[in-house]
Image (spheres, grey):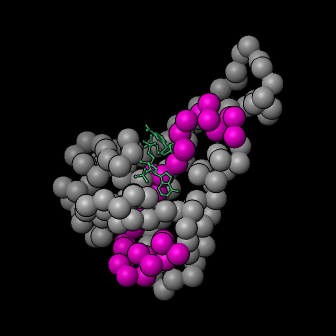
Amino acid sequence: MKILIIGARGLLGSFLYSKLKKKFKIYRSSRYKLKNFFQLDLNNPHSIKKILESYSFDAIINTSGLVDVEKCNRNMNLAKKFNSQTVKKLSMVLNEIKQKPHLIHFSTDQVYNNKNPKKKIKKIMLKLQTIIVNQNIWEN
Ligand SMILES: NC(=O)c1ccc[n+]([C@@H]2O[C@H](COP(=O)([O-])OP(=O)(O)OC[C@H]3O[C@@H](n4cnc5c(N)ncnc54)[C@H](OP(=O)(O)O)[C@@H]3O)[C@@H](O)[C@H]2O)c1
């Protein structure tokens, strides 16, 4: 099984790589030109399409994202660009190409209720959603 991990240099992506490489053929990507990584920027659909059309991946694990909460709250456009537009662009490319790999997308595990992040509040209501993952990934 050929799996592409997008965001493989990150905390989650590098962890998944270290676990999954024992069982599967894993490919990694980064926005930067690095040895043993595909250069892929989810904000650039052309770079996504080129790689996905050239390699028939069975699955794509998207662990890309902008995880700096302060930065996201200060700049909603940036947050949208890196946390939602990216997966939209990836899905659009997947709809266009012949191969249909499974797409596993990791979003956040935290949902903040504050509707106006600029408004200072003393107590932030925080809802945590539990992400249930296949135990085997973590155990092996
Ligand atoms: N860490 C956790 O425990 C955890 C738990 C649950 C959910 N999550 C979610 O998983 C995602 C990743 O978290 P993380 O902690 O691993 O973050 P991280 O360490 O900051 O890694 C994110 C990676 O995304 C890549 N990236 C950013 N923009 C990109 C773009 N436009 N195109 C392609 N790649 C891009 C970066 O790779 P390059 O710099 O190499 O391009 C970076 O290494 C987030 O959505 C986070 O909310 C994380």
Residue occupying image coordinates x 55% and y 35%? 68
Nearest the camera: 127 or 69?
Answer: 69
Residue 139, placed above or below residue 48 = above
Question: In the current view of this chain or complex, which residue is farthest to the bottom?
Answer: 98
Q: Is residue 14 left or right of residue 78?
A: left
Number of numbered tags placed on the structure image: 0
Question: In the current view of this chain or complex, which residue is farthest to the top?
Answer: 122
Q: Position of residue 31 (x, y in %)?
A: 43, 58
Residue occupying image coordinates x 25% and y 62%? 36
Q: Position of residue 75 (x, y in %)?
A: 69, 40
Residue occupying image coordinates x 30% and y 59%? 34
Nearest the camera: 76 or 102?
Answer: 76
Nearest the camera: 92 or 47?
Answer: 47
Q: Position of residue 113 (x, y in %)?
A: 73, 31
Range shown magenta: 46-75
Q: Is residue 4 left or right of residue 67?
A: left
Please check the rendered image and state whether residue 113 is part of the magenta-colored stretch, yes or no. no
Residue 102, placed above or below residue 5 = below
Please check the rendered image and state whether residue 69 is part of the magenta-colored stretch, yes or no. yes
Residue occupying image coordinates x 55% and y 71%? 45
Can you tell which quarter of the image residue 69 is in? Answer: top right
Q: Is residue 10 left or right of residue 71?
A: left
Q: Is residue 56 left or right of residue 120?
A: left
Question: In the current view of this chain or complex, which residue is farthest to the front?
Answer: 33
One can see residue 61 in this view: no
Q: Position of residue 46 (x, y in %)?
A: 53, 75
One can see residue 42 in this view: yes
Q: Quadrant of the N terminus?
A: bottom left
